[in-house]
């Protein structure tokens, strides 16, 4: 079910701190318990119609080459990708449920990488879905591109829900994802090969 073993480990920690709640309280999240993963963690703030990057791990910053802390999440994506992500984000977290996705992004050097993200909601001061725990893993390099120098997020190749006990949204992801895929070289795409095997 989980893309990488690390995703499962982060999920298991999140699941343990929630106890009998649907969503764990943010104050129960102890960074020391996730020391092996800290550089790849991020915290997102959910504020009405905005999703902002509150905290971004140092390993993510090194890999992407940009520190997005304090910025709106969808500012640096292709419109077809960000429109898809934003239109479904509220549905996904109002259930609530978690999700994981595999995407292609462009580093500042022009290197294209395939990466995966696990997103799990956190409750703050009694509000059930106003922060999101994000864990990211690099899956592999897929090529080089100089066509989109100001764009980081180029495409979402796969996305799946994680049922937290409330069900998942009734959204046909495959149909929508077809419009967001960006696979510069399918033979080099680790996850694409995995999906097709």
Image: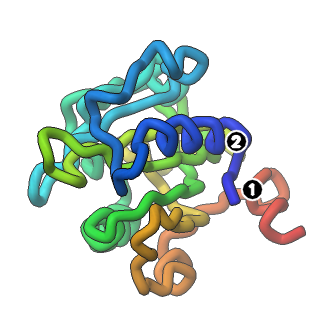
For this view, does 37 lie left or right of residue 79? right
Residue 191 - label: 1
Give the farthest residue toward the right: 197
Up/down of 15 relative to 66, above or below: below
Residue sitting at 24 percent across and 31 percent down? Answer: 54
Would you say residue 175 is visible in this rendering?
yes
Measuring from the top left, give residue 191's x and y in whole percent.
75, 56
For this view, does 11 lie left or right of residue 29? right
Q: Nearer the viewer, residue 150 or 168?
A: 168
Question: How is the rendered protein coloured?
Answer: rainbow
Residue sitting at 48 percent across and 55 percent down? Answer: 154
Query: For numbered disc 1, what is the local secondary structure?
Result: helix
Q: Nearer the viewer, residue 181 or 147?
A: 181
Mark closest to the chain's N terminus, 2 or 1:
2
> Few, some or many C-alpha atoms within 10 Å of disc 2 (few <14, some 14-19, many ≥20)?
some
Rendering quarter of residue 43? top left
Query: For numbered disc 2, what is the local secondary structure?
Result: strand
Up/down of 187 relative to 149, above or below: below
Residue 95 - label: none
Up/down of 124 relative to 175, above or below: above
Up/down of 39 relative to 162, above or below: above
Rendering quarter of residue 49? bottom left
Distance between the alpha carbons at the discs numbered 2 and 1:
7 Å
> Few, some or many C-alpha atoms within 10 Å of disc 1 (few <14, some 14-19, many ≥20)?
many
The residue labelled by disc 2 is 139
For this view, does 182 lie left or right of residue 83? right
Residue sitting at 40 percent across and 51 percent down? Answer: 20
Measuring from the top left, give residue 64's x and y in whole percent.
49, 30
Measuring from the top left, give residue 22's x and y in whole percent.
36, 56
Which quarter of the figure is the C terminus placed in? bottom right
Residue sitting at 43 percent across and 84 percent down? Answer: 171
């Amino acid at each position: 079910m989980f893309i990488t073993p690390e995703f499962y480990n982060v999920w298991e920690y999140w699941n343990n701190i929630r106890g009998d709640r649907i969503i764990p309280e943010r104050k129960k999240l102890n960074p020391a318990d996730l020391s092996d993963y800290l550089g790849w963690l991020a915290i997102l703030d959910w504020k009405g119609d905005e999703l902002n990057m509150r905290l971004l791990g140092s390993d993510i910053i090194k890999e992407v080459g940009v520190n997005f802390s304090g910025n709106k999440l969808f500012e640096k994506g292709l419109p077809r990708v960000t429109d898809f992500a934003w239109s479904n984000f509220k549905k996904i977290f109002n259930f609530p449920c978690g999700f994981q996705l595999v995407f292609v992004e462009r580093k500042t050097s022009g290197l294209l990488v395939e990466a995966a993200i696990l997103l799990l909601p956190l409750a703050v001061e009694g509000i059930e879905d106003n922060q999101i725990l994000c864990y990211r893993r690099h899956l592999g390099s897929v090529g080089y591109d100089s066509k989109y120098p100001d764009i980081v997020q180029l495409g979402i190749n796969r996305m799946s829900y994680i049922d937290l006990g409330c069900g998942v949204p009734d959204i046909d992801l495959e149909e929508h994802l077809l419009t967001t895929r960006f696979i510069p070289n399918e033979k080099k795409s680790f996850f694409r090969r995995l999906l097709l095997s």
